[in-house]
Image (cartoon, rainbow, N blue to C red):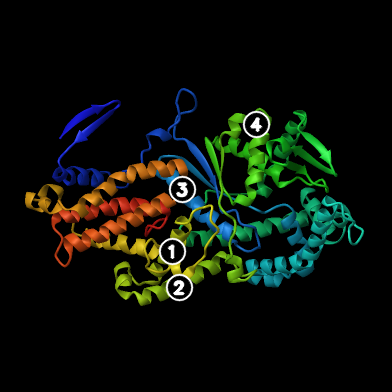
Amino acid sequence: MFPIQQGVHLRIMLQEEALPRLFLPYIIDRKDSYGCDTRFRRRDSVAQSPGRKRVIVEFSSPNLASDFQGKHLRSTVQGDFIARLHEATGWDVIRMNYLNDWGKSIALLGVGWERFGAQAVFDANPIGHLTEVHQRINALFEPELAASRKARSDALHGRTPENGKTQAQIESEGLFAERDNFLKRMEGGEEKALAFQKYVRDVSIKDYAALYRRLGIHFDDYSGESCISPDTMTEIEEMVKSKGLCEERDGQLIVELKKYKLNYGKIRDRSGSRTYLLRDLAAVLERLRKYAFDKMIYVVAADHKVQFSQVTKIFELLDMSHVASKLQHVFFNETSKMVEEFGEGHCTLDAILARCTDATREALKLNQEKAATMGDTEETVASVGVSAIKAQELSARRAREQVFDVSHMVSFESGTGPTLRWWYSMLSDAVSSRPNLDEISDEDWGSMESDSVFNLLRLLAQWPNVVQSVCKELDPTLITGYLEKVTMELSEFVKEDIGSKKPTEAQIMLFEAVRVVFGSGLGLLGILPGLP
């Protein structure tokens, strides 16, 4: 072994047979820190306050009393992965769930509650009854919403409205008017309206927190639209006005962003209510003041891409590029048929978990030998079911539509959650009586000179580069693809080098090194057994 200088690099040449003796102890000693470099996640103590860099990861963000859509599941799993990745590489991570707990959707639910709500039914099944109320009021509202869209289309194409009413006229009547009135009651601080909104929020958080725990996911901050201070929204509105960015159009207060290919952003709507965009702008300021974050990542579907681009652009126009540069939108294809598969009003996170658990139980019955390796308790069944969900979501490219294929996700095909979990269990069993490195004989090390060994060692050596690439791209498929390659090479090693023989002590050390790296990858994906 000797070094050769090549420019800024120092190349080290060594005989292949020496590689296992040097490399396996290196991995095993570092355990799950191997490949996860935390040195570059610290602040510059001269330029700013010292310590770890802080990132807010906003993800999941479901609509209250509504279906848990495919895009919410993708956001939940992808966001948890991004949070785990930053945690593993030394960031101070704030996991935030920004709930849709204010605005017109909650106001419409309030109108529905006043028509259809029953306290006794709610007390017995809060989430179920709220979902029922949501379905009933939305069924009544849908024809009015369709008429509004039609009137807008007629106006854009110069057609005379069929019923003689403009979009503005339609939206000033019926359930539109009742909804807007309920929202004004909320914004005006009416006790009854606010009590309803708070009750919906509180019972929803309690329900979701329990379901997220089953997924092995937690949040540090259950924020939401209702948490944004009116004073901060007024501050943002005044800032936008003072910069001359606002104009009134069709009874709305807007920021024209057409020259940036972002159409226009609404600050206030026709009813005078504050919009989602205004709340998002105010939320950035409040989070910056509360958490002093270095980066904030929104893990939200692509159908919100324009809105997040508007947020960034408006901060730039407010001469706050230092804030805009901290914001990042990680988006994915919002298309999913998950709601259709479960049925509208029945696509809840609880139903998703229950279906995957049931399917996993049946899959394990058909693969009893593998089930015995992982354990056949109900806790294991539920855990493997969660792994199945996460592996399918994290192995799919974000640009593609969601594929919610339960039969495939719970199978033992290559790359699925059950398969990855089975391999980890096999590795754990193989190293249950791991020897000390200094007790391994030269003869044992001699069993480590095959092509399959060196193929595995090459893969293990790539792990730090894989993590580095993942940190740059925030792409979990780089990990799922890597782990699938490891299982393929591991299968070849077992077949060619071990067969029916008892593994040598050196081969057991190789299993341990693979288990360390494999476990790190599963940990980043959130599918390692026993993870919080």
Q: Which residue is mark 2?
A: 359
Q: Which mark is residue 368?
A: none
In the image, what residue type sits under mark 4? Glu
Q: Which residue is mark 1?
A: 388
In the image, what residue type sits under mark 3? Asp
Q: Secondary structure at mark 4?
A: helix
Q: Which mark is residue 475?
A: 3
**Residue positioned 83% across, 41% down in the render:** 249
Q: Are marks 2 and 3 in contact (CB under 8 Å)?
A: no
- Image coordinates for residue 311, horizontal then vertical, percent: 66, 39
Quadrant (top left/top right/bottom left/bottom right) for the N terminus: top left
Q: Are marks 1 and 4 in contact (CB under 8 Å)?
A: no
Quadrant (top left/top right/bottom left/bottom right) for the C terminus: bottom left
Q: Which residue is mark 4?
A: 316
Left or right position of 526 against 27 = right
Q: Nearer the viewer, residue 431 or 388?
A: 388
- Eyeballing the image, is 333 above or below 134? above
Q: Earlier in the sequence, mark 2 or mark 3?
A: 2
Disc 2: CA contacts within 10 A as few (<14), some (14-19) or many (>=20): some
Q: Earlier in the sequence, mark 4 or mark 3?
A: 4
- Image coordinates for residue 438, horizontal then vertical, percent: 12, 47
Task: In the displayed orientation, state which residue is furthest to the top.
Answer: 46
Which-is-in-front pick, marks 2 and 3? 3
Left or right position of 372 against 206 = left
